[in-house]
Image (spheres, rainbow, N blue to C red):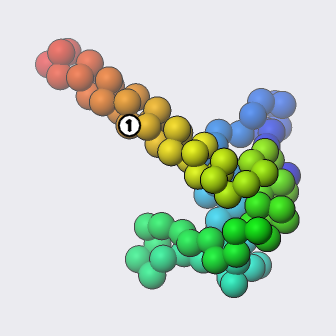
Amino acid sequence: MLSKTAQGRSTPFPRRLLAMIRREAIRNPLIVRWSPDGRAFFVDDDDVFVTDILPVYGFKASKMQSFQVSSEIYNRTFILFLLRAFLLYIRLL
């Protein structure tokens, strides 16, 4: 399971997600697979993904929709962080 680091801290969401997709695309290509360009991933069997794969990697979602919402929240937070960092950088110029 990848939900904790060696120091006992939580592994960041994107790191767990990437590790999960990399491993499961090889182990279970009928359930999880990369897009042809490698920029996205697809889940072809939501039920198996949520019940058998997500818990192994420390994700607590019990429905596919919950996992999607978590992903969207993280993406919005990360985009806002980048925007703030960019604005700060411009002010320092």
| Secondary structure of residue under mark 1 | helix
Where in the figure is residue 37, as x and y percent of width and height? 41, 77
Where in the figure is residue 2, as x and y percent of width and height? 79, 49
Reply above or below: 61 against 24: above
Q: Which residue is mark 1?
A: 79
Residue at image location 76% in from the left, 61% down from the top? 50
- Amino acid type at image mark 1: Ile
How packed mark 1 is, by other alpha carbons closer than 10 Å (few <14, some 14-19, many 20 or more), is few
The answer to which quarter of the image holds residue 28 is bottom right
Where in the figure is residue 56, as x and y percent of width and height? 84, 57
Image quarter in which the C terminus is found: top left
Residue at image location 70% in from the left, 61% down from the top? 20
Where in the figure is residue 16, as x and y percent of width and height? 68, 50
In the displayed structure image, the side of residue 51 where residue 45 appears, left or right = left
The answer to whether residue 57 shows anywhere in this view is no
Residue at image location 61% in from the left, 57% down from the top? 18
